[in-house]
């Protein structure tokens, strides 16, 4: 495949100018590690979720569960091994993602724009690029004019598929590649729901509706090669709004987390997952567990694929906390989207006084929501 043809798969703003020398794939690792990730906690899922194990090799399960709590307090994330998800499934999802991303840009947009003739139908899979900030329907959020410039925000060097797992079984594609991808995502989503449910139980006890599997979604990302990787980010510094996020990354690397005033590269290791705490779990745990800041670098010579699972509270559930005013996830999401549209960035938990005001005054809330939509 010629490079000129291949770059047709990139969104137009990501394509190198025609007068620039061709970018060659490289096997070298050009990333400069700011700090090795050897101290990132490693958690054995099997040991933590198998209480009958009592051998010399597998110590008391409570000891291993305490390690999860300790990792979430100190780091806000951990590396998960022995998670029980078949490596063949992980590889198949990744390979089919690569095939879809390699399709021409216009083809990808058309595939997921309207999957049926019904005007009321919302596809469970949507395509986006340039920003991970999406509406509940999966559409990209466009900041108000001047918001990005005022906050030094730039185009983020990524494209992706947003997948609503609860709706995925409602559609079947005639195209074999799309239908196979849909089936793989559905199977992968069930596996991740199992893992997230067990981890949430270990970190609790919390109210059962503080995490709703029905809210689960997948984000499948590709980070294209970039001629000037030092001038942009795949995804800029942020925290997740979720309860839990579970990330599978390929062998390229680029994920960084912030701890003790420095950035740490989260190096990819085969058949492992990265689990990180989101804003919702920080709030419901009274700041015992911390939502971790992270970002994604881009690479001049290599593309990167990652697949993230995000799960949230039931929308109307009121989260009670000694650190924050009562709020629902629906209110929190509305506030985040308002901030993104007006400020170009997410303020997150620090603005929960505003959420309390909105929650207890429905008329003002309705007027505010109308203004931001």
Image (cartoon, helix red, strand yellow):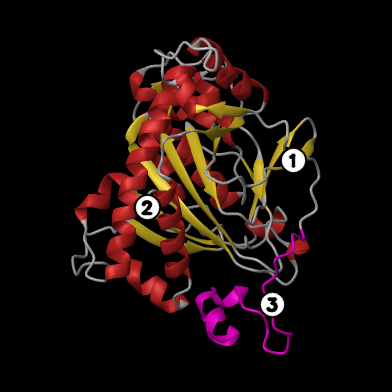
- 172 relative to 368 in the view: left or right: left
**At x 52% / y 81%, what residue is drawn?**
8
Residue tagged by mark 1?
264
Residue stretch rendered in magenta on the structure: 1-30
Residue at 48%, 60% (x, y): give it. Answer: 160
Q: Position of residue 283 (x, y in %)?
A: 53, 23
Q: Which residue occupies the foreground of this view, 245 or 36?
A: 36
Q: Residues within 10 Å of mark 3 (few under 14, many from 20)?
A: few
Comparing 173 with 30, the one in front is 30
Residue tagged by mark 2? Answer: 163
Question: From what the image shows, is residue 187 above or below residue 49?
Answer: below
Q: Nearer the viewer, residue 351 or 169?
A: 169
Q: CA distance from mark 3 to mark 2?
A: 32 Å
Q: Position of residue 79 (x, y in %)?
A: 59, 34
Give me the C-alpha separation between circle 1 and circle 2.
Answer: 29 Å
Tell me if I can see residue 72 in this picture: yes
- Residue at left offset 39%, top offset 12%: 52
Where is residue 94 drawn, in percent x and y?
46, 57
Q: Which mark is residue 370?
A: none
Image point (33%, 54%), residue name: 184
Q: Is residue 25 magenta?
A: yes
Residues marked 3 and 1 touching at CB (< 8 Å):
no
Q: SS of the residue at dot 1?
A: strand
The mark nearer the N terminus, 3 or 2, is 3
Main SS category, magenta section: loop
Q: Secondary structure at mark 3?
A: loop
Q: Earlier in the sequence, mark 3 or mark 1?
A: 3
């Amino acid at each position: 495949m010629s490079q000129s043809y291949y770059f047709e798969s990139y969104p137009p703003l990501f394509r190198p100018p025609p007068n620039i020398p061709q970018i060659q794939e490289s096997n070298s690792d050009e990333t400069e590690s700011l700090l090795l990730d050897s101290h990132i906690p490693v958690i054995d899922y099997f040991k933590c979720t198998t209480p009958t194990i009592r051998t010399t090799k597998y110590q008391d399960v409570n000891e291993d569960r305490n390690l999860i709590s300790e990792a979430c307090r100190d780091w806000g994330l951990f590396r998960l091994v022995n998670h029980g998800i078949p490596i063949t499934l992980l590889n198949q999802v990744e390979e089919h993602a690569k095939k879809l991303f390699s399709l021409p840009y216009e083809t990808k947009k058309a595939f997921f724009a309207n999957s049926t003739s019904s005007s009321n139908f919302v596809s469970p899979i949507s395509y986006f690029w340039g920003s991970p900030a999406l509406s509940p329907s999966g559409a990209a959020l466009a900041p108000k004019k001047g918001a990005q410039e005022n906050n030094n925000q730039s185009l983020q060097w990524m494209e992706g598929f947003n997948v609503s797992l609860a709706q995925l079984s409602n559609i079947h594609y005639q195209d074999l590649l799309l239908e196979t991808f849909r089936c793989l995502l559905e199977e992968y989503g069930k596996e991740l729901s199992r893992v997230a449910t067990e981890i949430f139980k270990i970190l609790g006890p919390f109210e059962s509706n503080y995490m709703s599997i029905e809210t689960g979604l997948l984000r499948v990302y590709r980070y294209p090669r970039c001629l000037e990787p030092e001038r942009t980010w795949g995804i800029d510094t942020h925290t997740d709004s979720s309860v839990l996020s579970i990330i599978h990354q390929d062998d390229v690397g680029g994920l960084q987390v912030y701890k003790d005033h420095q950035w740490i590269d989260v190096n990819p290791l085969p058949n492992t997952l990265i689990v990180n705490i989101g804003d919702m779990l920080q709030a419901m745990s009274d700041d015992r567990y911390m939502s971790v800041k992270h970002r994604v670098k881009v690479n001049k010579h290599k593309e990167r694929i990652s697949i993230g699972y995000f799960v949230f509270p039931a929308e109307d559930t009121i989260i009670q906390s000694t650190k924050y005013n009562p709020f629902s996830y629906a209110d929190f999401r509305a506030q985040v989207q308002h901030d993104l549209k007006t400020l170009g960035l997410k303020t997150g938990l620090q603005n929960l006084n505003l959420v309390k005001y909105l929650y207890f005054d429905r008329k003002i809330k309705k007027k505010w929501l109308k203004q931001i939509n």
